[in-house]
Image (spheres, coloured by chain):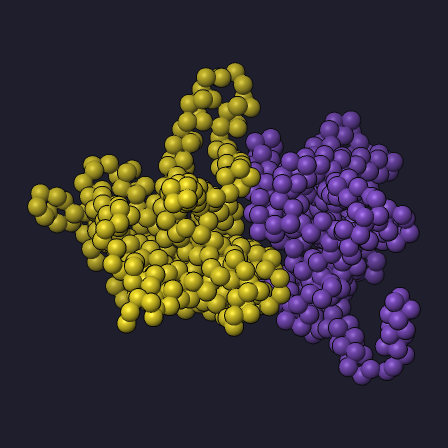
Amino acid sequence: MTSDAASVEIDMESGFNTKTWAIRIASIGIWFLPLIWIDPTTYIVLTIAGLAFGMLLFMVAAGMTIIFGLMDVLNMAHGALFALGAYSGGYWILNLLEKFGWVEYGTAVQSFGSLLLAIFAGALAGALLGIVVERVIIRGVYGDHLKQIMITMGVLYVMTEVTKIIWGASPEVVLVPMMFQGSYDIFDVIVGKFRVVALIVGLAMFAGIQLVLMKTKLGLIVRAGVENREGVQAAGYNINRIFTGVFTVGAALAGVGGTMWCIFQEQVYPEIGLENIIFAMIVVIIGGLGSVTGSFLGAIIVGLSFNYVAFLLPKLAMGVNILIMATILLIRPWGLMGKE
Amino acid sequence: MMINDMTPVQRDRLREQQTKYNRPSFWIQVALVVVLILVPLVPSFRVMDMVAKIMIFTVVVASYDLILGYTGLLSFAHAMFFGIGAYSVALLCYHSSSPQWYHLILAVVAALTLSVILALVLAFFSLRTKAIFFAMLSLALADFFHILGMTWSDLTLGEDGITFSLPGILNVEWSGVNLLGVHFTPRVMTYYLILVAAVFLFMGLLRFVRSPVGRVLKSIRDNEQRSTALGYKTFRYQIYSIVFGSSIASLGGILFAVWLRFVDPESVLGVFSMVDYLLMVIIGGLGTLYGSIIGATFFMATQAWLPDLLKGIAAFFPDYEIIHRIAERWMAFLGLMFIVAIMVFPKGVVGTVREIIDRRKASGAG
């Protein structure tokens, strides 16, 4: 079976297929299209910003797509986990550390320390809420997509209000650690320092997820679970425990995403969860439900096009994402890397 | 034609026609309409305002029930269609210096055209694959329109919203008329306009779900494979339902804007207002249509009294600031109610009552 699939793939690779190559060249070439309207320096700035933005989107989308792939749960409450991560990691912890002078005027070590602590706190907050949501809410609605979407939307709604109770309804400023303030200037190309951090964290996260999924036994079980849940159960693994574990990890990733996002934007507000769940959803649909690599590609596509269009026609930035999603659904209804 | 020659559907319809005036539900409906006609006699604006909103949301929620309960599709774009209707009235009346009647008609035409096109596009893109795509795509589209309403401030005045005036006897400057000792103000005239439109639209929805198309929709919801095997094109019937339901929602939006004479993005286009709609549908009962009356009444009553109730409770604990903050966020309780309703009360009021009646009938017959 596996050898068959491999040989087919090899055939496809070795045979020079004009159509596939045309698509490949076109899909790379399309990213140079904005150069018609944007001068090269701005283009490079926007591209780096778009990549960083894409990495931030990937952090949210990754958890969502893994949870969907394994558990068949479309989790709108992911936005709530994201928002909680943003508030507790990015806002609360950094403000706390600022009292010790670590953040705004700290040394390099203190800056790195505060960022790591913030990420850790965000992940922890996301994971804790994630366990509660999975155990209390989602466990009752496995297998029923409509109910899942409705009930997790309800959770997102309630959590948005709870955020307002705890931290107030108005936007709050988020501090940026000393090391990551300002920007690098390389031959007039201005790159925000935190964008670089976002890029590194996003890439590390992608590599980490792939490593765990592909190289460890746990990853093997999770991948097998995506393919055939009953089979994994029959092999003697407690699928419920795996579900809770994966959900918690996904929730922690959302928390990290929230922390990174609010430091990147330098502000945080209660509706941040809803806004980002819609972004993440678009990314997940483009990439194909359940595929991490697909989400990675989808996030980059959305991040780049959002930044280009936001520069050229600010009002239509959100529209272009929907347009991309619609186009991809038209050509490949199951997404870039999804299963048919 | 003899009874025995008829198809089951024809027999059903005949029985329905014969017993039309003998059933209690018919007279309940007549009594309800009479009560609604008499409401403006109550000398309290708050009551009339609430009843008008209940009527509007009954129509909107019933049309949502058509899509969710009868067709089994979860749409997050219903608020968007509602908002399209509301904004089409508001924009036409605001941007024309003195609004005329034809502006209202134009608004209806514009709202219907736009919502039919959008519903078709949405259905075309999302229904080709899994049903959840419909939920996700509609959410993304609804969010786009919300952002558009907020940022396109040359047209929509952004977050501040639009206050506008209405033509003729609906305009606040019209002096009103005394008839049989009752003073008919422009507000009362608007109320009656909404009453007529709401009753008409609700009856249209009832007619739709009882039509052959409605029967097919129910069969698709209950067993899609079987309906397909019987030769019904699922896709086409789902499109009928989405387009019809969404158009009614946009008409509901027109009524809402006409009643308030004010629209803003948060109240008519906000994505989270979908949770309100869902709460109303679930409380009333999915797939019942009549449930939307109960759901809308429950929601409007809760919305009116809950903030005061919570403030009253919080007043007992003057020393605890956190209780006051919780009391301020009464919407969180609506959300909690929604979650609990899905978990423990998924059939809603009408669904549960029907189940009890059916069980009684079954035990009485057996």
Residue A327 location in percent, x, y? 64, 70
Q: Which chain is yellow?
A: B
Quick check: can you spot residue A300? no
Residue at 12% x, 43% y is B182
Q: Is residue B203 left or right of residue A85?
A: left
The residue lying furthest to the left in this view is B180
Query: Is B238 on the left or on the right of B185, as rendered?
Result: right
Work out which residue is located at the far front of the displayed protein and give it.
B366
Q: Position of residue A40 (x, y in %)?
A: 76, 68
Note whether residue A218 is visible. Answer: yes
The image quarter in which residue A95 lies: top right
**Who is closer to the viewer here, B103 or A311?**
B103
Front-lying residue, A279 or B248? B248
Query: In the image, what residue occupies the spot 41% across and 35% down?
Result: B302
Q: Is residue B215 left or right of residue B16?
A: right
* Depth check, front residue: B132 or B117: B132
* Chain with colour purple in the figure: A
Q: Residue at x 44, y 52 (%)?
A: B287
Can you tell which quarter of the image residue A244 is in? top right
